[in-house]
Image: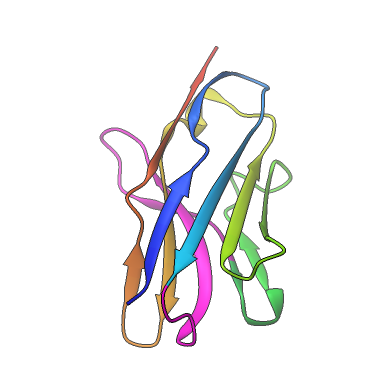
């Protein structure tokens, strides 16, 4: 059974950086991509970035040029480097594993960006 644990969230000022980590445990053989999503208060969860087979990477337009998704030296870790943070980036950030028959989600980590 796949489990995801996010970490690295916190409170920062606009323009600062954070790096989120997602550690994946369990059978990874059916995972074809790992992604980050976020949910701001009162809003729907939205896609942020993903890394798939062959390290194919996608970003939401709102974070292109500021956020970078990458794998760690260990295959079971995915990072989200967030630079030039803005107040509108404030949200709970979730890691997700896209699998053949379902998606698995982590518990989320809070990111708060103040002016």
Whether residue 107 sits left or right of residue 61 in the image: it is left
Whether residue 27 sits left or right of residue 62 in the image: it is left
Nearer the observer, 47 or 105: 105
Q: Where is the N terminus found, in terms of image quarters?
A: bottom left
Whether residue 101 sits left or right of residue 73 in the image: it is left
Residue 4, given in percent of the width and then of the height, sits at 40, 61
Residue drawn where x is 58% and y is 26% of the image: 86
- Please say if 16 is above or below 104: above
Residue 110, given in percent of the width and then of the height, sits at 40, 34
Instruction: Identify the image quadrant of residue 65.
Output: top right
Residue drawn where x is 29% and y is 32% of the image: 41
- Please say if 10 is above or below 81: above
Q: Where is the C terminus found, in terms of image quarters?
A: top right
Magenta segment includes 93: no
Nearer the observer, 76 or 102: 76
Nearer the observer, 53 or 8: 8
Q: Residue pushed farthest top? A: 115
Residue drawn where x is 34% and y is 50% of the image: 45
Magenta segment includes 42: yes
Residue 66, given in percent of the width and then of the height, sits at 70, 41
Q: Which residues are magenta?
A: 26-50
Instruction: Identify the image quadrant of residue 53.
Output: bottom right
Q: How is the image coloured?
A: rainbow
- Please say if 15 is above or below 69: above
- Please say if 86 is above or below 50: above
Residue drawn where x is 31% and y is 79% of the image: 102
Q: What is the total number of numbered labels drawn onto the structure image?
A: 0
Whether residue 85 sits left or right of residue 42 in the image: it is right
């Amino acid at each position: 059974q796949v489990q995801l644990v996010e970490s690295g969230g916190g409170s920062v000022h606009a323009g600062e950086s954070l790096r989120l980590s997602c550690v994946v445990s369990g059978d990874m053989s059916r995972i074809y991509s790992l992604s980050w999503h976020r949910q701001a208060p009162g809003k729907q969860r939205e896609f942020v970035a993903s890394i798939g087979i062959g390290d194919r990477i996608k970003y939401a337009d709102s974070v292109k040029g500021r956020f970078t998704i990458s794998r760690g030296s260990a295959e079971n870790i995915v990072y989200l480097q967030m630079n030039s943070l803005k107040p509108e980036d404030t949200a709970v950030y979730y890691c997700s594993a896209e699998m053949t028959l379902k998606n698995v989600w982590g518990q989320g980590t809070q990111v708060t960006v103040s002016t």
